[in-house]
Image: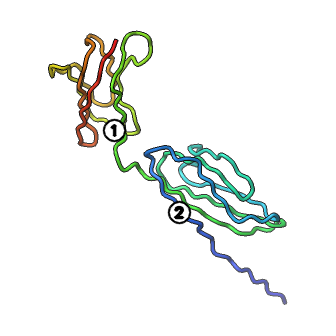
Amino acid sequence: MKWWVFILLPLHLLAQETYDNCVDIPVQNYQVEYDADKEYYWHIMGPGTNGFFALVNTNGNTLSVYWPDSIGTYVIAVYTTRFGCEGDTSYHEVLIEECPYLHLFFPNSFTPNGDNHNEVYQIGGRSADEIEHITIYNRWGEKVFEADGNIPWDGKNSPIGLYAISVFVNNNRYVRSITLIR
């Protein structure tokens, strides 16, 4: 009677990377040891597996990935076969965390002059959807625009000049200046 012994090898954890979604993450390259007799099969699991990440390239033992700004944990798995038999499996974890600081872009001017360029003033950036309230004042401190949320200001019935914008987001107040140009 023959006894077969199967040895289960532990999975290899290559490393863990952590990014935040404050800026775009450059293309990342991952590589495992090369063996000419092996075939390599790459898989990515996590919230981005529904098309939120871009698989740039796979070339045998090398994988290039453009990670999304969507927060979550992604796992890269690679397994090999050699002469039709399953071989090594390795895992690599990529964690994308929420940006630890507010990310807003305040344009300093706009030109509502009918040319279809810069017609409205609107705050941009990844945190723009978190804006709770906006108030815009003219140079005499009179309120000329007010909105709950990041609503664009068209500047209608307002003369050229300098204005102040007050923005509430995450219980913080930010004040900037705006120049209306025609």
The one nearer the camera, 8 or 18, is: 18
Is residue 73 positioned above or below 154 on the image? below
Tell me, for residue 130, which label it has, or none.
1
- Tell me: residue 169, above or below residue 61: above
- Residue type at mark 2: give it: Gln
Image position of 165 (left or right of 71): left
Q: Quadrant of residue 6?
A: bottom right
Q: Position of residue 12 (x, y in %)?
A: 62, 70
**Direction from residue 176 to residue 14 in the image, left or right:** right
Instruction: Judge by depth and name the residue closer to the eye, 63 or 70.
Output: 63
Q: Quadrant of the C terminus?
A: top left
Other residues around mark 1 within 10 Å, as few (<14) / some (14–19) / many (≥20): some
SS at badge 2:
strand
The residue positioned 37% from the left and 34% from the top of the image is 105
Secondary structure of the residue carrying tag 1 is helix
Picture quadrant where residue 166 is located: top left
Please count the marks in the image.
Answer: 2
* Residue at image mark 2: 16
Q: Position of residue 77 (x, y in %)?
A: 64, 60
Q: Quadrant of residue 3?
A: bottom right
Between label 2 and label 1, give the one nearer the viewer.
Answer: 2
- Residue found 45% across the figure and 47% down from its top: 21
Q: CA distance from mark 2 to mark 1?
A: 30 Å
Name the amino acid, label 1: Glu
